[in-house]
Image (cartoon, rainbow, N blue to C red):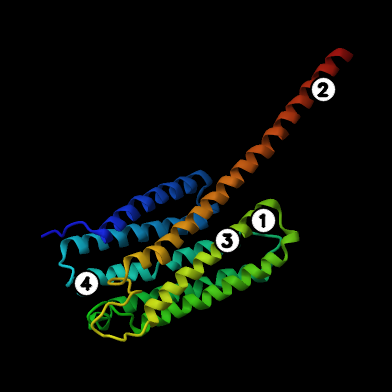
C-alpha cells in the first residue's frame, strides 16, 4: 500500500525533474559536438542517469514500503550504492575537462590526470562491494562497511590530487588561451562544491553512532533530507550548471569572434573585386 507524499518524496520528485532537464541538455551537447570531443559531457550524462535511477528507486521505496522497514530493504542498498558512487562521474568529468587544456598542462600532468581515473574505478568497485555486503543492513539502518569507507577514502585522495593539479595548471595561466582560461575558471569554481560533497560522504562513512537506535544525520538512507539536499544534491546541480555556463560563454565568445572575421573578409573581397573591375 502506498504511503502519503511527504517532504522527502517532494524533494525526490523535484530532483527527478531537474536532473531530467540536465540529462536532456548534456545529451544535446554531446550530439552537437560529437563523442570524440565530449568526454566531460559523457561523464555528466552518466551522473544524471545515476541520479535519476537513484532518486526513482528511493521514491519508489519510500512510497511503497512502510518507513520503519525502508532502511533494511534490498532496494535501499541500491540507493546507497548509487548515492555513494555519485562522485565518480563528477570527478571524471572535472579531470577530463581539466585535461582538455594544452599549453599550461604539460605532458606529465596529462598522464597524472588520466591515471587518477584508476583509483576512481577502484573506489567505485569498493563502494559497490560494500553496498551489497549483508553487513551493511545488520543494524537499524544502512551502514557504511569497511569497503565503503575505503572507497570514500580514495575519493579524498583523488580530490587532493585534483586540487594539486588545478593549482599547478593555474600557476601557468599565462600560457593559456582564452578558452583554457574559461576551463580553469570552471574547475576552480567547482572545487568548493566538491569540498561540500566530500565532507558529506566522509560524515556518512565515519560518523560515530552515539545512540545505536537513532538515525545518523548524514546517513544516505535514513539521514536528514535537508542535509542531503544541501550537501549532496545541490553541489552536484551547481557543478553541472557551471559546466553549462562555461559552454554557453564559450559559444557566445566564438560567435562574436567569428562574425567580425567573416564580415571583414567578405568586405575586403567585395572591395578587391570592385577595384579590379574598375582597373579593367
Disc 4 is placed on an element classified as helix
Disc 2 is placed on an element classified as helix
Crowd class of label 1 (few under 14; some 14 to 19; many from 20; radius 10 Å): some
Crowd class of label 3 (few under 14; some 14 to 19; many from 20; radius 10 Å): few
Rounded to the nearest whole Å, what is the CA distance between mark 2 and mark 3? Answer: 48 Å
**Residue 6 location in percent, x, y?**
23, 58
Q: Which mark lies nearer to you, 4 or 3? A: 3
Rounded to the nearest whole Å, what is the CA distance between mark 3 and mark 1? Answer: 12 Å
Whichever of callouts 2 and 3 sits on the residue coming sooner in the sequence is 3
Rounded to the nearest whole Å, what is the CA distance between mark 2 and mark 1? Answer: 38 Å
Quadrant of the rendering where the C terminus is positioned: top right
Q: Is residue 44 left or right of residue 275?
A: left
Can see residue 126?
no
Q: Which residue is mark 1?
A: 181
Rounded to the nearest whole Å, what is the CA distance between mark 2 and mark 4? Answer: 75 Å
Q: Which residue is mark 4?
A: 74
The numbered mark at residue 26 is none
Q: Quadrant of residue 134?
A: bottom left
Q: Quadrant of residue 103?
A: bottom right
Extreme-right residue of the structure: 279
Quadrant of the rendering where the N terminus is positioned: bottom left
Of residue 107 and residue 45, the one placed in the foreground of this image is 45
Of residue 87 and residue 235, the one placed in the foreground of this image is 235
Rounded to the nearest whole Å, what is the CA distance between mark 4 and mark 1? Answer: 46 Å
Q: Is residue 122 left or right of residue 13?
A: right
Q: Which residue is mark 3?
A: 189
Q: Are marks 2 and 1 in contact (CB under 8 Å)?
A: no
Q: Residue at x 56, y 75 (%)?
A: 160
Q: Which residue is mark 2?
A: 272
Q: Is residue 66 left or right of residue 153?
A: left
Amino acid at each position: 500500500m502506498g504511503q502519503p507524499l511527504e517532504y522527502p518524496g517532494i524533494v525526490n520528485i523535484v530532483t527527478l525533474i531537474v536532473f531530467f532537464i540536465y540529462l536532456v541538455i548534456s545529451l544535446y551537447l554531446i550530439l552537437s559536438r560529437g563523442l570524440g570531443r565530449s568526454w566531460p559531457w559523457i561523464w555528466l550524462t552518466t551522473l544524471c542517469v545515476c541520479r535519476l535511477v537513484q532518486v526513482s528507486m528511493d521514491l519508489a521505496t519510500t512510497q511503497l514500503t512502510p518507513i520503519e522497514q525502508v532502511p533494511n530493504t534490498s532496494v535501499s542498498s541500491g540507493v546507497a550504492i548509487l548515492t555513494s558512487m555519485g562522485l565518480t562521474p563528477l570527478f571524471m568529468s572535472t579531470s577530463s575537462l581539466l585535461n582538455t587544456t594544452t599549453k599550461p598542462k604539460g605532458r606529465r600532468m596529462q598522464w597524472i590526470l588520466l591515471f587518477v581515473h584508476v583509483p576512481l574505478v577502484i573506489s567505485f568497485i569498493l563502494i559497490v562491494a560494500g553496498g551489497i555486503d549483508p553487513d551493511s543492513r545488520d543494524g537499524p539502518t544502512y551502514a557504511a562497511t569497511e569497503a565503503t569507507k575505503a572507497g570514500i577514502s580514495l575519493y579524498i585522495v583523488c580530490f587532493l590530487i585534483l586540487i594539486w593539479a588545478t593549482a599547478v595548471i593555474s600557476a601557468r595561466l599565462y600560457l593559456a588561451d582564452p578558452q583554457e582560461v574559461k576551463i580553469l575558471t570552471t574547475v576552480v569554481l567547482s572545487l568548493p562544491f566538491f569540498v561540500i560533497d566530500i565532507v558529506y560522504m566522509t560524515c556518512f562513512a565515519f560518523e560515530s553512532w552515539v545512540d545505536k537506535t537513532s538515525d545518523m544525520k548524514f546517513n544516505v538512507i535514513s539521514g536528514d533530507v535537508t542535509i542531503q539536499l544541501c550537501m549532496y544534491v545541490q553541489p552536484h546541480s551547481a557543478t553541472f550548471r557551471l559546466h553549462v555556463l562555461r559552454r554557453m560563454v564559450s559559444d557566445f565568445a566564438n560567435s562574436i569572434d567569428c562574425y567580425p572575421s567573416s564580415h571583414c573578409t567578405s568586405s575586403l573581397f567585395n572591395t578587391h573585386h570592385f577595384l579590379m573591375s574598375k582597373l579593367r
